[in-house]
Amino acid sequence: MLLLCLLALTPALVAADDDSYRAPEAIPDTTRVDADQAWRLFRDGVTFVDVRLEADFRAARIPGAVNLTIMRDPEDPRNRFTRESLLEAAGDREAPLVIYCNDFDCWRTEAAIQRALEWGFGDLHYFPGGYPEWSRRNYPFE
């Protein structure tokens, strides 16, 4: 009986684990920024990369941000976050980039940062609060 109860709970525990993603506090070789620091980078003309789904991007975004949707599977046809597209957005691998998504429970920011690091991008600003934190601070959006 105990075994049956445990087996019945397993799918719920797995689902809860998937739903409980929380962005890491830091990602090595990046600079974590909050909305106020992102605002300063924005004013300095740093490129912002929005890795959310295209529908979210169309609804509202940080002005001038480039939408490079990232999917879990790099071969997914909806995936626009590629080495080539990121290089095009940045201009070169040493240019600063701010990468963001939808708040602290969005896995996309971390995944994009990890791929960008693997591809040799060197000045990455990790903005885990993303668009929601930006808008809560009443910074401009379009």
Image (cartoon, helix red, strand yellow):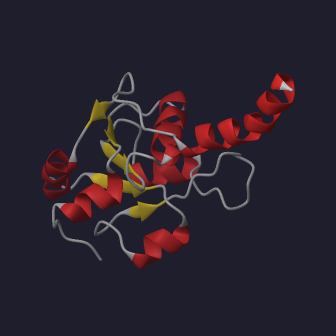
The answer to whether 56 is drawn above or below residue 9 in the figure is: below
Q: Position of residue 31 (x, y in %)?
A: 28, 32
Q: Which of the pair 54/65 is nearer the observer?
A: 54
User: To which quarter of the image does residue 89 belong?
Assistant: bottom left
Q: Residue at x 42, y 77 (%)?
A: 59
User: Considering the image in quadrants, where does the N terminus appear?
Assistant: top right
Name the foreground residue: 76 vs 85.
76
In this image, 24 relative to 10: left or right? Answer: left
How far across and down, in percent of the image, does residue 54 sit?
53, 69
How many numbered discs sit on the rendered protein?
A: 0
- Asked whether, in this view, residue 23 is left or right of residue 20, the answer is left
Where does the image place residue 2, in percent across and percent down from the top left?
A: 81, 24
User: Residue at position x 54%, y 64% from top?
Assistant: 53
Residue 130 pos. (x, y %): 34, 53
| Residue under the image location 54 percent in, 28 percent down | 118
User: 51 or 87, which lies in front?
Assistant: 51
Q: Quadrant of the C terminus?
A: bottom left
Q: Residue at x 46, y 37 (%)?
A: 113
